Image (tube, grey):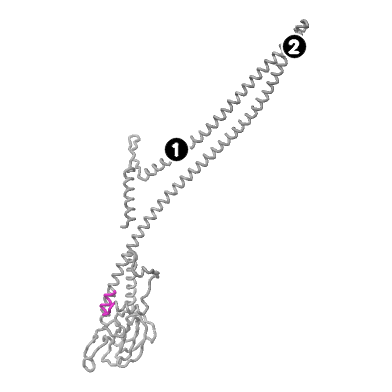
Amino acid sequence: MTKEENWFSNVKTRSSEITNKYFPQRQLVLRTDGKLAYLRVSKGMQMSLAVSAFALFSWGAFTTTTHFLHNGDLLAKDKEVLSVQVAYRSLLTEIKEYQAKFTDISSELEANHTMMVGLAQNDAQDLDKETLKNKDKLVSAEAARKEAQIARLHLNTQLISIEDSMRELANRNYSLKGDLSSKEFDLQTALGERNAARLQKVRLEEKLRQTEIQVARLNHSQEDLVRRVTDQTNEEISDLESILTMAGLDPDKMLDALSQSGNAAGGPFIAASRKDEQYVHSAEQAQKAKVDNQLVRWKGLQHIKQTLPLAQPLDYYYISSRFGKRSDPVNKRWAVHYGLDMAASKKSPIYVTAPGKVSFVGWKGNYGRFIVIDHGNGIETRYGHMHKTLVKKGQEVDYRTKIGLVGNTGRSTGAHLHYEIRVNGKNVDPYKFITAGRNVFQG
C-alpha cells in the first residue's frame, strides 16, 4: 500500500470515527393515542441538519451585524436633524420675542399719541416740553423699530438657510435609506451567491472524492489485470515451450531465428533517454518492460506454433517405418531413414499439416510423386510416393487442405506415405511433432 493510499485510509477511518461519535444513529419515539411510532434519523440527515443550522446561524449573525451598523449611521443622521430642528425652534422663539418687543413699541407709540392729544389742551410750555420728550421717545421708538426690522430680516435669512439645510438633510436621509435598501439587496444577493458557491464547492468536493475513489479502483483493477495477463501469458508461454520441446525443438533458438528474420519485432515506440538506456528508474517501468518482453516472447511462440506441422497428414494409418536407423525394405541393408512411413489404403486423402506455400510439385526420383510445403520460419514438410497430387507450385494452402492421394510410386514396396519434416534444412523426427500435436488438440 502506497503512502497516498495509507493517508486516504487514515483520513477515512478518522472521519468515520468522528461521525459515529457526534452523529450516531438515533430514533425518535412518537406516541399518539397509545400507539408508538419510531422515526429513524440517519447520520446523513443529522449532518445535513447540522450544516443547515450552522449556515442559518452564520447568515443571521452577518445580517444582524450589518443591520446594527446601518442603524448606527441612521441614528447619527437623526441626531444631526434633531439638532437642526432645535436650532430652528430657538430661532422661532427669538422671532417671537422680537415680534412681542415690536408690539410693545407699537403700543407705547399709541399711548404717546393719546397722551399728546390730551396735552394739546395744556399750556404751551408744558406742551412744548412734553412734545420734546415725546419726540425723543418717538425717535428712540423709531430706531428700535428699525433695529427690530433689521433683526427680523436677518432672522428670516437664517430661517431660509436652515430650511435649505433641512431639505438637504432630508434628501441625504432619503439617499441614505435608498443606499441602505440597495446594500441590503446586494447583501442578500451576495449571501445567495455565497450559499450557492458553498453548495457548488460541496458538490465539487464530493465529485472529486468519488473521482479519486474511481481512480484508485481503476489503478487497482489495472494492476490486477496486468497481474492476470502476466500469469496467463507465462502459463501459455510455458505450454508453447513444452510443445516445442516435445517436438524436439529449442524455443530460444527458434525465437532467435524468428527475430533475425525480422518477424518478431513489435510493440509501442518509447523514446529512451541516456539514463533509460542504462537502467530502469522505477518499479512501474520495470514491470511494464517485463510485461512487454513476455508479450513479445508469447507472440513469437504463437507465430512459431502456427507454422508447426503438429497435425497428422492421414486420418487412418499405421507406422510401417520410423525415423532414424532401419533395415532397408528393398535390399534389407542398414540405412538411415529421414522420414516416417505411414501405411494406409491406396488413394487415401493426404492433408497438409500446417498453413504454408507449395514450393515443389512433381516427380522426385525414388520418392515418386513428391510435394514440398514451406511453412515459414525455416520449417517445411515433404510428402512422397503419392498416387496423385492435387496442388500446384506457388499455391497457398491452409491447414488440413487436401493436397494428394496415397500411392506406391517411386522406390516403394506398397501403398504408404513417406512424411518428412525439416527445420532449417535439417531433418527431424515427425513422430515427435505428431505426439506434441495430440497434446495440443486434446487440450
Write down the region rendered in magenta.
240-251
Q: Which residue is depicted at the point 28% across and 93% down? A: 411
Tag in front: 2 or 1: 2
Of the residues shown, which amino acid type is indicated by label 2? Leu
Amino acid type, mark 1: Ala
CB-based contact (under 8 Å), mark 2 and mark 1: no
- Packing grade of label 1 (10 A; few <14, some 14-19, many >=20) is few
How far is mark 2 from mark 1, CA to CA?
82 Å
The residue identified by callout 1 is 61
Count of labels in the image = 2
Secondary structure at badge 1 equals helix
Numbered badge on residue 385: none
The numbered dot on residue 132 is 2
Residue 152: x, y in percent?
Answer: 67, 23
Label 2 Cα crowd, 10 Å radius (few <14 / some 14-19 / many 20+): few
Q: Which of marks 2 and 1 is nearer the N terminus?
A: 1
The residue at 74%/13% (across/down) is 135
180 left or right, relative to 384: right
Name the residue nearer the viewer: 203 or 357.
Answer: 203
> Considering depth in this image, is 36 or 71 the residue closer to the camera?
71
Res 351 seen here? no
Answer above or below: position of 236 versus 362. above
Percent coordinates x, y for residue 214 in the rendering: 37, 57
Q: In this view, does 101 lie above or below 369?
A: above
Q: In which quarter of the image is residue 306?
A: bottom left
- Residue 249 in the magenta stretch? The answer is yes
- Could you tell whether 365 is left or right of 86 in the image? left
Q: What element carries label 2?
A: helix
Q: Is the magenta stretch mostly helix, strand or loop?
A: helix
Residue 123 lies left or right of residue 389; in this view the side is right
Is residue 226 within the magenta segment? Answer: no
